[in-house]
Amino acid sequence: MEKKPLVYFLCTGNSCRSQIADGFLKALGSDKYEVKSAGLEAHGLNPRAVQIMHESGVDISKNTSDVIDPDILNRADYVITLCGHADEHCPVISNKNVTKWHWGFEDPAKANGTEEEILSQFRIVRDSIKNRIEQFVREGN
């Protein structure tokens, strides 16, 4: 059986954006890709991210918030950062064959307002990430 390319999504806290990307790529492309996510730190899984992903039919409630693993980082085929902080502070990758991309998305965890306004921001980011994941699965870039 052929080894699937490993996609490693990175964010600052591995609580929201990287978890959403992880969930969508597993749901839409697990036949093509091995998927992992991590953060520069582990902030725990954001309950609103779980909620808005559930609305989309994707269960990330069993995901864990993990710190970047150098072994996974250096065997990844794709390293994709989802926030500027992770992009700027990503550890050095010794794998010279890795494809590294930055897909920047606003941090919905920083949204203010009523609960509905905050959830609206989460949904906007979720839908943007889903569109980007669908393009990646379709086109491989």
Image (spheres, rainbow, N blue to C red):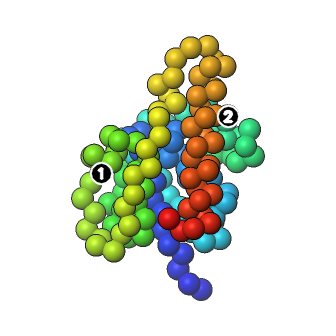
For the residue labelled by badge 2, is the local secondary structure a helix, a strand or a loop?
A: helix
Residue 5: in sight, yes or no? yes
In the rendered structure, the answer to whether residue 88 lies left or right of residue 112 reads: left
Depth check: give the residue in front, 124 or 89. Answer: 124
Decide: marks 1, 2 in contact (CB < 8 A)? no
Q: Is residue 44 above or below residue 113?
A: below
Q: Looking at the image, which residue is at 58% across and 28% down? A: 121
Q: Residue furthest bottom?
A: 1
Q: For the residue carrying disc 1, how many other residues have a C-alpha within 10 Å: few (<14), some (14-19), or many (20+)?
A: some
Q: Going 56% across and 84% down the picture, which residue do you hit?
A: 2
Which residue is drawn at the image coordinates 48% and 68% (left, top)? 6
Q: What's the residue type where badge 1 is placed?
A: Cys
Q: Is residue 13 left or right of residue 118?
A: left
Number of other residues with Cα within 10 Å of mark 2, as a class: few under 14, some 14 to 19, many 20 or more: some
On the image, the x and y values in percent for residue 90 come to 30, 51
Question: Alpha-carbon distance for marks 1 and 2?
Answer: 28 Å
The residue beneath circle 1 is 90
The image's mark for residue 51 is 2
Q: Position of residue 24 (x, y in %)?
A: 62, 53
Instruction: Evaluate whether residue 61 shows in this view.
Output: no
Most foreground residue, 13 or 98: 98
Judge left or right: residue 57 versus residue 39.
right
Q: Is residue 112 left or right of residue 115?
A: left
Whichever of callouts 1 and 2 sits on the residue coming sooner in the sequence is: 2
Toward the top, the furthest residue is 114
Q: Which label was assigned to residue 108?
A: none
Instruction: Look at the numbered disc 1 and give the secondary structure of its residue.
Output: loop
What's the residue at 59%, 22% (across, down)?
A: 118
Image position, residue 100 (x, y; %): 37, 61
